[in-house]
Amino acid sequence: MKKQLIGLTSAALALGIAASAFSGCSVGNVKLEYHYYHSESDELNNLIEQDYNHEVVYQNDLKTLGADPSAIYITEGEDAGYYYMYDTSDPINATGYLCYRSKNLNDWECMGVAYNPTLYIENGITYSAFSTAMYWAPEVIYDEDMGLYLMFYNASYLFKGYRFFIDVAVSESPKGPFVQYAKWISDSPTATPEQKEAWAPVADNEAANRAGLGNGKLKVFMPLLDFSKIPAGTEIDESWQKGEALKEGELPGYMKVIDASPFIDEDGEKYLYFTQDLGDLHKTSAICVIKMNDDWTPDYTQLKKLTAANYPTLDGTRTELYEGTTNEAPFTVRRGDKYYLMYSANTYTQKGYQVRVAVSDSPMGPFRKLSKAEGGWLLYSTGEWMSGTGHHSLVNNNGSMFVVYHAHVNRRLGGKDSPRAIAFDEVTWIKNEQGLEVPHANGPTYSHLPVLASEWKNIAPEATVSSTNIAEGSDVKYLNDGVIKIHDDVTFVKEFEMEAGANVITLTFDDYREVTGLFIVNSHRYETSVEKISKIEFAFKDGNRKGTAYAENLEYDYDKYYPGGEYYVTGGTFALEFKPMLVKSVKITLPKFEEALAISEIMVLGK
């Protein structure tokens, strides 16, 4: 395809933005100066990606290495306006957690170490956290009642290999330093004697001898969850009644658990979801929940298993759900009177690692897994542009929700040898064909899309949309419903379809709006994709002067979104960026075409 940059001065191209919104006259029709994102090639026809203005545009470049991301948005204090992220930086050698911050979820600044485990010597005795290695999957939440950030995580017990426990650390700041909960209680001037006794460090002579310290020379601050404390006779899921599930390893009452995920309900009740990982014994994993007290200590009488791999419901019949042996990485949200448990299926090394959805009327279940047709596959890759899209968290800002997840740096093949990196996409809510509201991810993507995780937002849903040449059964509402169709097999997610011929689409706002970008998301199928836009016209005003700023002859970037004719990248865009201007309407003219085509979404970046 022809490669071009349109309407740019050399200075504007160097900056990645136009020097002014439009050139020529201040009234009438004027040519818009803009940055159009379109690939270049060198003499060997190698694709050269453009840089982009990160304040307006993002794409999942996979440049921030890490896995299992937990992202939160800070609304108060010196970090207000920033997203913070915590992740697994090194699964084997990690001895704590780093944290990062960002204004846009795409560009992350390392803020240093957020948590180092307790380790000090006093009167010849070494005091240590239960673990000093293999720190995985942190998840951070802010508890308004406690006025603290809490970091839940799993790590391996001293010298026990892959024997994992779940713990929590606390901090007054999102950047830390976080302090292990047991140590924090021990040092707290307001803790009761009973609390201090319950969380006091415990002598561990076996670990001391393995460390070469000798008997009585090591005291350990224990983790948050200890399943040996389950009261006798408690009615819990029968999987806990099996001795091998509880007795795995050498520790009394041990059960291998990872991926802790806290949830605070609207009524203030607290829950902790986690993965029961029986991989060493049964080659499978499941999602569980335990009710927590106000101080985030566990209530062992309220403990339930919620899912099992390839079971639609826990008490149902095994069905091939293409989950492999894995249900892990839970994350729970409430919407209305429904609870949505999102989890990862398959193995993280596989290209098919993905996020699924189950629904319940209660945070304690029972949960029912939604089928793919119901919208139960939230985030998954079926193409060559992303791989291993899983272990996520959700974060809200500016009225938008985003899924932050990891993916393989090796986009096409994935695999155990591929590093993982951080990506994100928007999540919307849509009713499925059964009338149930379900989350829908506008991803995974590898395209130029608007930065919505900032002061700007997509204002297209606020516009009135009209179009000529609408295909029978289609509707203009699909152009600005905020939903991008990524996969062909989710039928209730619709694109706007057009009959053969020319077409004009118009978005009109009730009043002039400040606008800085336009993103037209092409069809999810190559066969119905739009090759060219003849003209885009913005009805603008500048003070008391009004006019029309236009861009014309925009070709779709098939070099990027259909490289070599080998595979088609879903979610590709006609992406324009320009200096902010006040816009009343946007008119998009398509050339005459010989067959029915489609557009997935139109996004207007504005205020």
Image (cartoon, helix red, strand yellow):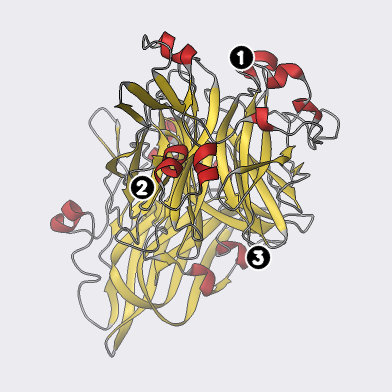
Q: Answer left or right for 324 relative to 16.
A: right
Q: CA distance from mark 3 to mark 1?
A: 59 Å
x 72%, y 56%: residue: 338
Residue 134 visible: no
- For label 2, count other residues whose C-alpha is less than 10 Å away and answer few (under 14), some (14-19) or many (20+): many
Q: CA distance from mark 2 to mark 1?
A: 41 Å
Residue at the bottom extreme, as displayed: 544
Q: Quadrant of the C terminus?
A: bottom left
Assign a secondary structure to mark 3. loop
The amino acid pointed to by label 3 is: Asp
The amino acid pointed to by label 2 is: Asn
- For label 1, count other residues whose C-alpha is less than 10 Å away and answer few (under 14), some (14-19) or many (20+): some
Q: Nearer the viewer, mark 3 or mark 1?
A: 1
The amino acid pointed to by label 1 is: Gly
Image location (x, y in percent) of residue 473: 72, 61
User: Which residue is label 1 attached to?
Assistant: 249
x 14%, y 55%: residue: 10
Q: Quadrant of the N terminus?
A: top left
Q: Answer left or right for 508 relative to 341.
A: left
User: Which residue is label 2 attached to?
Assistant: 106
Image location (x, y in percent) of residue 78: 29, 60
x 61%, y 24%: residue: 256
User: Which residue is label 3 attached to?
Assistant: 475
